[in-house]
Structures are given as structure tokens and as C-alpha cells.
Image: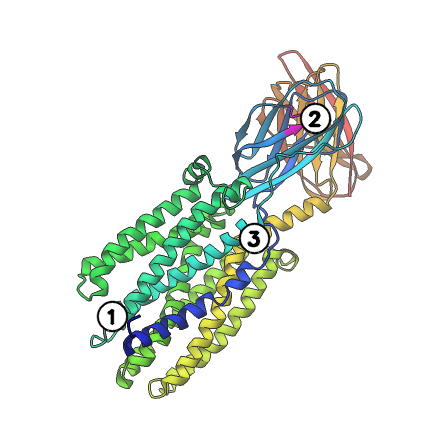
Amino acid sequence: MLPMTAATNRWTSRLAAVAGLLLAALPVVLLPAAPASAHAVLVSTSPVTDSVLPNAPAEVVLTFSESVRQVPDRVRVIAPDGQRVDQGEPVFDGAVVTVGVEQQTSRGTYLVSYRVISADGHPVSGGFTYSVGAPSAVPTDDGGADTDPLVSGLLQATKFVGYAGLLLIVGPVLVLSMLWPRRLARGGPGRLVWTGLGLVAASTLATIWLQAPYVTGGGIGDADGAALRDVLGSGIGAALLVRLGVLAAAAVLLRPFLAGSEGRSDQILLGGLAVIGVFTWPLAGHPSASPVPAVSVVIDAVHLSSMAVWLGGLAMLAVFLLRQAEERELAAILPIWSRWAALAVCALLLAGTVQALIEVGTLEALFGTTYGRLLLAKIGLFGLVLAVAAYSRQLVRNRSAAGRPGRMRQAIVAELAVTTVVLAVTAVLVQTTPARTAIGEDLRADSGYFSTTLNSDIYSLQVEVDPARRGNNSVHLYAYTEDNRPQPVIEWQATAALPASGVEPIEIPLLPLTDNHATGEISLPAAGDWELRITVRISDIDQATVSTTVEIN
């Protein structure tokens, strides 16, 4: 082995220090986590969960809270004898999934199991039962798949590594462009940039590989060609491929830049690539499926960019400038950096606040969900970072930082140490169901739910009211023929009245979703026994009206 030079030893120690700070939180990321739940939720089913039908249905309909995509062979209907009775491929129409069912005469309980992909690329799986004739033992689905905890944990780790790599690219490039003394060599920062480039590339490739078993429910070695093609053909896959292209182009432009021979056009191109690259993170995560995706994507990109500028700049100060720059150089550099850091922190706070309002929405969701509690932990850690940053800024204002860089370096190392944990929490957050979705699912689980089947001379009508409590309610209507096949409907009409309180019939606006399925929203202002009247016209001359009473709590 060749002896190491003093310069090599110094570089090795610096790189080890940065790597140690960035990887310190990996144990947090790799701790066993609860299975990551998806960000679409099952809103309603037909047949209704746990309902008992006189005859086997011709189809099963699942309605989710947002658009979903298919996982091959993962929507199944299992008969009481354990045999599959789903027929043909399920039909995906936005948030509605329709599964044909063989016309079986066997009585008993049927299991519907599903695994689909939500709009932000996370899988959602579950199941429900219905019975024909009378309930029986619930069958099992050996083909069902849950998320492998190892795959989920490794995905969190790869996201953390990607964040770490991004700040090792952005911070050094920005400091070299604007603050780096000309007399200092660029070799050390250059190696930091190449390290960051390698980390982002490795993270992106690993994410593509892991996304396949994450979606299908397989193990880490189950990423076959078909699954990988599905990943690359999705919105997340497209964003990750764009990121790899940006990294390849940046690698070409960074060579002259790190050698100090770049031109103005190179800097402009690098800036453009940086903007495109940063946007691939929100486009491959929660923001792309938020209630206001355009706002969420931009806000998340600002949040990520501010983080990279701030932490990457801190790493450059701690590892290089505070060690190598002269006092007069630091006296010029540190005030400029202090203003940059203040702007970056302000952008972080503003973007983080907007993100929280979108992804959390309510205090109940903030304190009552895993996402909300992780966000509170992140806020607490960020407050600690701000306290240390305020101390560093005070040193700069007192003009003591340039003369005593050791104190400044210790403060910056402390900032980096805490923000490394913040990055780890963020990596877990992006794999966790947003609070707005989780609290909605909890409320649906805890709320009432009304379902009944009404019969007329010409059709059978399944009526669902959710959550059957005072306030906004969703109404779903499903029409069937006498032999339980979907009944095409020409016109729907429905009203709700509360005679005991003198509330006259209120018309329910109905939107046909399929030939036999309509839905509507109505606000019921008071508790009590509400009378629903539904008129269904199935031809120019055939129509009938049915009614039922719904207890609203």
C-alpha cells in the first residue's frame, strides 16, 4: 500500500466528517417501520361491505378517493370454496374499479381483495366481504400481497441518500460560483460534488428498482422486467428518468466548472438543469397528488432548493472555507453567506407552512396522525437548528467569526448534525400517508354508515349514505335488475326531507358515474330520521319511486 500524503489525509478526514454527518441518521431511516400506507382510500363498495344479498352480483365496484392504477392480477374475488370467481380484467375508470363476477349459485361469504396504485405511486391494499344467501366462514386469498417491510425501509433510506447527494451538489456549486476565493484550489469541493452526483444517481437507480416490488408487494429480488417496465411507464418512473438525464448532462458541464474554466453559458445551463432536476422530487411524490398539485409541486421544489442551498453551503463552510480561507477573506464571505442563509431559512419556513396547510389541514390531523406527529418532530428539530443558526449569525454580526473560525465551525457542525436528523424524518415523511388522507380514513372508519336495498316492480336499488351524520353526506345509488344484473338508468331523481322538524324535501343533485351508478352530495343540517325518496326512470315509459328512512346522528 502506498503511503498517504498529508493532503490526502486532510481530504480523507474532511470527507469522513461530512459522510459521518450525513449518514448519522441512517439508523433512524432503517428502523423497522409500520407498513407505509397509500394515499388513496376506499370510499365505497358495491356490494356494501358485510352485506347479505339474495343473489350473486354480476360485478363488484370499488370507489376510491382519487384515481388509481392497476397492479396486474391483484384485484380478486374469492368464493366461499376458496376459488377465484372474478371474470376478465378489472376496468379502471379514474377512481372507480369494476370487476366482473362469474354467476355462481353457491351461498356463503365472498372475499374481495385488492391492491392498486394511488396517484402518487404508493400502493393501497385491503379487502372486504359480502355474502350471498347467508354468511359463512371468510375465505382466504393466498395471492394477496402486503408491502415488504425491508423494501419500504430501503425506499426510505434511498430517499435520504438522494437528499444528502442533492445538497452536496447544490451547496458546493453555488459557493464555488459566488464565494470561493480564486487562490484556493477546487479539488476538494470538486470531489464533494462528484460524491453528491454519485449518491443521487445511486439513489435514483435504487428507487426505480425498489419501486417495482413496493408496488406489487414482492420482495427485494422480485423486480422482473414487466414490473420495471410498469414503473418506468408511470409518472414516477418518468420523473426518475428525467433526473438521470439531468445528472448525465450535469456531469458533462461540471468538468470545466470544477476546473475553473467554465464560461457564462455553462453556468446558465447548470442553473437550468438544477431547476429541472429539483422538480423531479415533488413530481415523484406526494405533491403530484395533492388537492392543488401545481401549488404543491412548486412549493415542494422551493422547500427542497432552500434546504440544499442552506445545508450544502454549511457543509462547504465547515469542511473548507473556515479551515482554508484567510481572515480578510472570511470577513467578506461570511456576511454574504449569512444573508443567503437567512433567505433560505425564510423560504423553508414559508414553503413548509404552505405544505403543512395542504397536507395536514386541521389540528386534529396534526396531532392525531403519524404524518402530523412526524411533522411536529421535524418542526421541533428545525427550531433547534434555528437557535444554533441564530448563534452563528450573531458571531458574524459581531465580526468575531472571521477572527475565531473555530467557534463558527463548531456551530455549523452542530447545525449539520441536527439537520441530518431532519433529513431522516423528511425521508420517512414522504413514505407516510399525508395527514389529510389518514384523518379522513379514520373519520370514515369511526363514522356511521347507512346501506339498504329497496325493491320496486321494475328494479332493485342499493342506497348508501356516508357518513350518515349531520353535515355533508355522500349518497350512492346502484340500480339492478331482478336477477341482480346492472340496470341501465336514463334519469335519476332524489330528495331528502325531515318531517319531524318541518324540513321540506331537499333535492339531491345526482351525477351518473356509470349506467347503473349515480352519486350526489347533500348537507343534512340536523340529526333525526330523514326520508329519502328516489325516482329511477329506466325507459321512456318505465319509472318507479322508492323510499327509505335514514337515521342521521
Q: Which mark is residue 186?
A: 1
Instruction: Name the residue nearer the viewer: 128 or 300.
Output: 128
Q: Secondary structure at mark 2?
A: loop
Residue 254, horizontal then vertical, whole percent? 25, 59
Q: Which mark is residue 79?
A: 2
Please indicate, yes or no, whether residue 294 appears anywhere in the rendered image: no
Task: Please rate how many residues cluster around mark 2, counting C-alpha atoms within 10 Å: few if below 14, some from 14 to 19, many from 20.
Answer: many
Residue 497, horizontal then vertical, whole percent? 75, 34
Q: Is residue 302 left or right of residue 533?
A: left
The earlier-in-sequence mark between 2 and 1 is 2
Please, what is the three-letter code of the amino acid marked with disc 2?
Ala
Residue at the front extreme?
1
Stretch in magenta: 77-85
Please, what is the three-letter code of the amino acid marked with disc 1?
Arg
The earlier-in-sequence mark between 3 and 1 is 1
Which residue appears at 60% of the width and 50% of the height?
Answer: 35
Q: CA distance from mark 2 to mark 3?
A: 34 Å
Please indicate, yes or no, whether residue 379 appears anywhere in the rendered image: yes
Residue 327, horizontal then vertical, whole percent? 29, 85
Indicate yes or no whether the magenta region holds residue 526: no
Instruction: Name the residue nearer the viewer: 543 or 13.
Output: 13
From the image, which quarter does the N terminus lie in? bottom left
Q: Which residue is mark 3?
A: 432
